[in-house]
Image (spheres, rainbow, N blue to C red):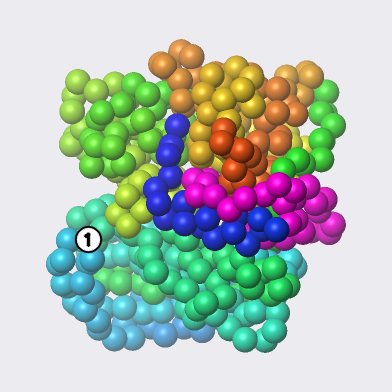
């Protein structure tokens, strides 16, 4: 299980306070999950699309937008690189106090009119950052009243931690929207008045050591915008009736409890990187022996320790930053990763039947998910299949050992705890749910059947 830090709790407090009047018996509470900004009120049914994805990843994509020192590069996997630096700057790492000078160049995307007037947006990026390089991703929204948000930093990121500490940025708000670790959300009062994000654009800044000839390469960048209605219960989907199960490696986070406590207090909180590592290895990738050399040789599954270190967010003080996990997966050759929302188990079945497992985010009280044996304010697990009855086959990292990771969860229970945005905790207080958040990792050249599945769920 993962217990989110106070940054997540603050988002839940703000949202609960804004919606208390619209939730039957609702009370503001310090919930610890994450939730979309208020929409139609508790129990509301979605009308029209609720999720819109836009990602840039082709050569033509990278040629568009505004370049200040960057250039599009072609090849098997096109990308964005530094051509001639636009300038130099000094960055003082808030987590180490180290001040360093960097050359930089920027790329600003075209404005993307969202198909969904959104209450939330989550950015994703895939990049190669050799030693001496890093990137910053920013998002700027245009409100439906025509005004704009500031440029919000959605992440300062490098695959390693030798140059900067990978970090989200706290304290960003304009009084109408706020960045909560990895999520830009319209604030409760503004959302209740009908304000939404109608369009947005992305800005990437690429950094390298002064005088270097190379630099980082960004392979994919974009965002998911959504307006999932506030609801305690979601509509039930009909199972396909076709059983299917993918052979995904099984890893327990619990066998790592107490290991490397500097990364979110050890394995007890490593559900996100453990799930990421399972799918990375499903696709046939593993960290090199050299990248695991720092791990104690007495520890089983050292790649899980590596994944925790590689996804750790120094501001959030945890390994559960959603885009950081997707970016980590994409550091492996030939893999791409994004964060999105799905709207039903039907969509998840579409992906699994095409051979694409997914990592889902959910929260629930003890007893709400039969067979789990625990409750959680926020937890990631890997969906690997469906039974003939439509029940969910999941690799749940919150298991005593690797052998017990595979679970079968009741379809209706799983669908509700994953897709809802509101729930009651053990104290009867209204707290939040993820609203269908998932990580999707797949080959950068996925083949026709997988392209069709990714298109069907709105990612491509």
Question: What is the x, y in percent for residue 410?
Answer: 70, 22
Residue at x-position 40% and y-position 51%: 6
Residue 50 appears left or right of 167: right
Residue 220 seen in render: no
Which contiguous range is marked in magenta? 22-49
Q: Looking at the rendering, which quadrant does residue 155 occupy?
A: bottom left
Of residues 73 and 177, the one nearer the viewer is 177
Q: Looking at the rendering, which quadrant does residue 386 occupy?
A: top right
Residue 84 appears left or right of 402: left
Residue 295 seen in render: yes
- The quadrant the N terminus occupies is top left
Please tell me whether the stretch drawn in magenta is mainly helix, strand or loop. loop
Q: Which residue is mark 1?
A: 95
Question: What is the x, y in percent for residue 212?
Answer: 22, 72
| Membership of 25 in magenta stretch | yes
Of residues 145 and 424, the one nearer the viewer is 424
Above or below: residue 173 compared with residue 297 = below
Mark 1 is surrounded, within 10 Å at the Cα level, by few (under 14), some (14 to 19) or many (20 or more) other residues, namely few
Question: What is the x, y in percent for residue 308?
Answer: 34, 40
Residue 282 appears left or right of 224: left
- The quadrant the C terminus occupies is bottom right
Above or below: residue 409 compared with residue 74 = above
Residue at x-position 78% and y-position 47%: 43
Residue at x-position 35% and y-position 46%: 318
Of residues 175 and 212, the one nearer the viewer is 175
């Amino acid at each position: 299980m993962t217990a989110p830090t106070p940054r997540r709790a603050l988002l839940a407090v703000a949202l609960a306070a804004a919606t208390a009047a619209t939730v039957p018996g609702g009370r503001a509470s310090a919930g610890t999950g994450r939730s979309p900004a208020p929409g139609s009120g508790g129990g509301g049914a979605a009308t029209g699309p609720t999720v819109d994805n836009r990602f840039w990843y082709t050569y033509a994509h990278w040629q568009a937008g505004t370049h200040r020192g960057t250039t599009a590069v072609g090849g098997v996997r096109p990308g964005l690189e530094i051509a001639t630096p636009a300038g130099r700057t000094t960055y003082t790492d808030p987590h180490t106090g180290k001040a360093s000078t960097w050359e930089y160049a920027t790329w600003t995307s075209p404005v993307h009119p969202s198909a969904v007037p959104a209450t939330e947006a989550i950015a994703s990026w895939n990049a190669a950052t050799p030693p001496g390089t890093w990137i910053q991703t920013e998002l700027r929204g245009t409100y439906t009243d025509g005004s704009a948000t500031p440029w919000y930093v959605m992440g300062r990121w490098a695959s390693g931690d030798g140059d900067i500490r990978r970090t989200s940025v706290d304290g960003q708000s304009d009084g109408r929207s706020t960045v909560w670790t990895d999520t830009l959300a319209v604030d409760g009062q503004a959302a209740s008045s009908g304000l939404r994000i109608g369009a947005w654009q992305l800005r990437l800044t690429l950094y390298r050591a002064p005088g270097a000839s190379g630099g980082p390469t960004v392979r994919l960048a974009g965002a998911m915008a959504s307006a999932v209605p506030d609801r305690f219960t979601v509509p039930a989907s009909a199972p396909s009736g076709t059983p299917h199960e993918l052979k995904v490696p099984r890893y327990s986070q619990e066998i790592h409890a107490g290991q490397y406590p500097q990364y979110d207090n050890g394995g007890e909180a490593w559900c996100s990187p453990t799930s990421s590592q399972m799918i990375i290895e499903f696709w046939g990738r593993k960290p090199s022996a050299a990248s695991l050399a720092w791990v104690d040789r007495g520890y089983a599954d050292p790649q899980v320790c590596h994944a925790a270190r590689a996804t750790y967010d120094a501001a959030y003080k945890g390994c559960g930053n959603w885009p950081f996990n997707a970016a980590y997966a994409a550091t492996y050759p030939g893999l791409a990763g994004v964060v999105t929302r799905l709207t039903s188990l039907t969509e998840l079945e579409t992906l699994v039947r095409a051979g694409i497992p997914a990592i889902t985010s959910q929260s629930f009280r003890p007893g709400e998910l039969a067979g789990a044996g625990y409750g959680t304010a926020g937890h990631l697990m890997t969906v690997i299949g469906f039974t003939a009855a439509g029940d969910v086959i999941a690799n749940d990292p919150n298991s005593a050992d690797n052998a017990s990771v595979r679970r079968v969860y009741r379809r209706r229970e799983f669908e509700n705890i994953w897709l809802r945005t509101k729930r009651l905790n053990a104290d009867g207080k209204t707290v939040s749910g993820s609203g269908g958040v998932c990580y999707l990792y797949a080959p950068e050249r996925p083949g026709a059947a997988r392209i069709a599945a990714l298109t069907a769920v709105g990612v491509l």
